[in-house]
Image (cartoon, rainbow, N blue to C red):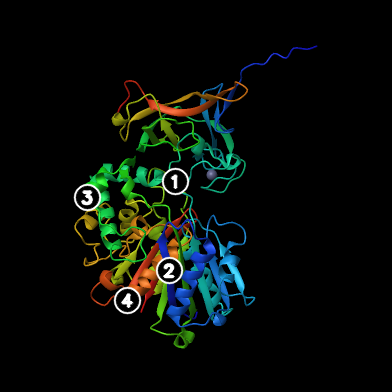
Amino acid sequence: MTIEKTEKKRIPLKEGLFDIEKGRLTGSKCPQCGQYFFPKRHVCLNCFHRDLEDVDLSTRGKIDTYTISRMVLPGSVMKEAPYGIALVLLPEGAIVQTVLTDCDVESISIGMEVELVIRKVEEDEEGNEVMAYFFRPVKGGSS
Amino acid sequence: MREVAIVGVGLHKFGRFPEKNIEELGRVAILNALDDAGASPGVIQAAFTGHVLQGTGAGLRVVNEVIQTGLLIDVTEKACASSSTALRHACWAIQLGLFDVALVVGFEKMQRGLLGAVTDPSAVTYDQLAGIRIMPGVYALQAMKYMHQYGARPEHFAHVSVKSHRNATMNPYAQYQKALTLEEVLNSRMIADPITLYQCSPTTDGASAAVVCAREKAHHFRGKPIIIAGYASGTPPYTPAGGGDLAEGMVESIARQAFKMAGLGPEDIDVTQVHDAFTPGEVFSIEALDYCPRGEGACFIWEGKADINGEKPVNTDGGLVSRGHPIGATGLAQIAEIVWQLRGEAGPRQVPRDPRAGLCHNVGLGGCNITILKK
Ligand SMILES: [Zn+2]
């Protein structure tokens, strides 16, 4: 008789968007024109070059614009409102749409400096930790 | 290229009709359009239908309620712009000379609640799971940036809904026929800042139809034909800078093409229907149509310039917010309103000064359609 040791794994809410071990979002870079994209894609929208490279994106950016969701979307991991939703502009020029965490929604502002955080949002039936990405205000950052 | 005329339009009232199926909604709209044109179903050579979520064969079933002559029945899905796209397909076919007379139909019965809620786990996106993609999302994000850039206030957007609801009280086809005060709109539940509940288009059941023909055949039908003077379509272009202005450039470019085809400019448009799935949509679209400079749309509407009696009447039938938004039927409902306005048949909501030309702006996930009509 063999006893299988089950280990809790950390798995992403959806594959392909971020690397849990590295703690980075995964985007694409066009080797021809240098354009960055998030999420990953195969063909460059700027110059139509194929075979874009996977790259780890910057973990800091600025809020380009935001809103505050006052309700929850049924079926989503956000079980409580209100929470902030923002478009974050990364230094590479990629735009990331994200939920904002660890902040008072009334303190969010355009131009605010934010940083990536990847954290557990729920456990699945096998006890795996399901991970999602968020951004949060940088402590002492410009706002 | 030969011109295309609209010779009949008809709607099924917009609202919530749990006891009715799409066949009934569609049948009523089709019969109203045929009667308006004074056309026998037998003269229709092809039908072009638009719907989004009504399932396989829905276009066939709806048209077959009235016409089963073996005609071509085309089906188009372009999200909230489906039936204006069906109209476009009818135009192309008539202009190619494939048909002389066609029927266009849009219809939808919508699920209650938020569009975009998670229903099919296999098709679900990260944005839905993570709570990022809420429905007024893009409109809310753009509105927040607009307020930041131009100093607009939440009341400016709320006022759009006050105007829409006032107009809809004069539209017997509208889902909501009750006026709202600015306070009522502002104090309704906040959905996503700055958009409150009464600034969101509702879930709606409804259907819309039009009879279109080659202009030289229009004399076979009753009443004064309305000419499709210009049209253009497109999708949001990729722009490297990205940013909050997700659709920046799309409407401007499509409007330019449509105006060029019509030989008209923004100053020539006497009545307009724009896609206000949420109130900021009306502000952004009248700026994109160049009715006023960028950043001034909120004040333009606030000052009454887009009222029925204003210099540039917009959403005279109540728009999506008050007339209702059965997604597949919305585009043709806009067309129907412009036809009635240009004929002078819009009753208490008729714009003054004998309108000569009107414009419809219909946007969906499938892009944007702009259609310019003239007498
Ligand atoms: Zn490239």
Residue for badge 3:
B182
Choose the circle earlier in sequence order: 1 or 4.
Answer: 1
Q: Which quarter of the rendered image does ligand 1 occupy?
A: top right
How far apart, in angstroms, are the residues tagged by discs 4 and 3? 29 Å
* Circle 3: element type: helix
Find the distance from the CA under tag 1 to the CA under tag 3: 24 Å
SS for callout 2? strand
Q: Is residue B242 above or below residue A20?
A: below
Q: Are marks 1 and 2 on the same chain?
A: yes
Chain of the residue displaying label 2: B
The chain to which mark 3 is attached is B
Q: Determine which residue is flagged by label 4.
A: B345
Q: Say which amino acid is labelled 1.
A: Gly
Q: Position of residue B298 (x, y in %)?
A: 25, 53
Amino acid tagged 4: Glu
> Alpha-carbon distance for marks 1 and 2?
24 Å
Q: Earlier in the sequence, mark 1 or mark 3?
A: 1
- Identify the subunit bearing mark 1: B
Return the residue nearer the eye: B258 or B241.
B258
Residue at the disc numbered 1: B113
**Is label 4 in a helix, a strand or a loop?**
loop
Q: Dot 1 lies on which element?
A: loop
Q: Are marks 1 and 2 in contact (CB under 8 Å)?
A: no
Query: Mark 4, chain letter?
Result: B
Few, some or many residues within 10 Å of mark 3 (<14, 14–19, 20+): some
Which residue carries the number 2 mark? B11
Tell me where residue B136 appears, x and y as whole percent: 39, 45
Q: CA distance from mark 1 to mark 4?
A: 34 Å
Q: Position of residue B15 (x, y in %)?
A: 40, 58
